[in-house]
Image (tube, rainbow, N blue to C red):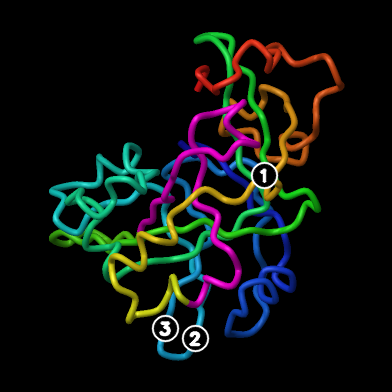
Amino acid sequence: MCGRFSQFHGWEEVHTFLNLLGPPRNLPQRFNIAPTQDAAVVRWSAQGRRLDFLRWGLIPSWAKDNSMAARMINARAETVAEKPSFRNALQKRRCLVPSDGFYEWCGKKGAKQPYRIFTPGGGLFAFAGLWERWEKGGEEPIESFTIITTEANDTLDVVHARMPVILDPADFGTWLSTELTINDALSLLRPAPNGTVEFHAVSKIVNNAHNDDPDCIMPLPEGSSDTPLFLHPYGKGG
């Protein structure tokens, strides 16, 4: 799964990477985004690609209330076209979730070590996401999103068995296209090639969602990880 991620690059970098429309915006630096918090996503509009802030944790339009959001932060690529919570969004409401890294935990219950996963150059990538708009009665409408996950590639499965779907930039337009078929959408939901990401151990301060600063992404000194990876060769700890 993907349970925490970061978005700390500025507007100019995000704008260029995702070919966004609109004037410059002040983007908050987020180093430890947690479920049910707002995060930036990119959606297609008649004018082009637009960046908006949506709540992380998808609330299906048919839900009676918004209590299920925290359980819907991820959608599995293998079943996303079948699950009632996701299949309509897969057909009509796809989005990109820009990120500069995400976190996974490895190890035994009660002693899991967090790891940060990022690009070798420290740049941006984009997850495949889905979004929904929920409104009931007189309550304020909520727009929310989920991140699609798939099997981990060979680089990452030493830490965790799954990873977010990281789309190739060449596929951004295809993923957002209103003409994309379900089968073609599913064909994009695959593990990123080996070498797309690397990782290092980070402080357990990321376990607390209130901690949201650059210390969250700093690598631990070599040898200080509580969970040697050779003990968990298949990511069974997460």
Measure the alpha-carbon separation of dots 3 and 1: 28 Å
Mark identifier at residue 48: 2
Quick check: 109 left or right of 117? left
**Does residue 237 appear left or right of residue 212 in this picture?**
left
Type of amino acid at the residue the image marks with label 2: Gly
Q: Which residues are magenta?
A: 144-173
Kindly give the residue lying farthest to the bottom in the view shown. 47
Q: Which residue is mark 1?
A: 31
Q: Is residue 73 left or right of residue 193?
A: left
Image quadrant where one finds the N terminus: top left
From the image, tell me which residue sits under label 3. 45
Q: Secondary structure at mark 3?
A: strand
Tell whether position 142 is magenta: no
Q: How many marks?
A: 3
Residues packed near mark 2 inside 10 Å, few (<14), some (14 to 19) or many (20 plus): some
In this view, the residue in front, 237 or 64, is: 237
Q: What's under tag 1, amino acid-wise?
A: Phe
Q: Position of residue 190 (x, y in %)?
A: 47, 52
Which circle's residue, 3 or 1, is located before the other in the chain?
Answer: 1
| Residue 21 vertical placement versus 163 (above, below) | below
State the CA–CA distance, disc 3 to disc 2.
5 Å
Q: Do the residues under discs 3 and 2 have CB atoms within 8 angstroms?
A: yes
User: Residue at coordinates 20% horizontally, 48% vertically from top-left?
Assistant: 83
Residue at point 32%, 51% (across, down): 58
Badge 1 vs badge 2, beta-carbon distance below 8 Å = no
> Is residue 35 or residue 222 the one in the foreground?
222
* Kind of residue indicated by mark 3: Ser
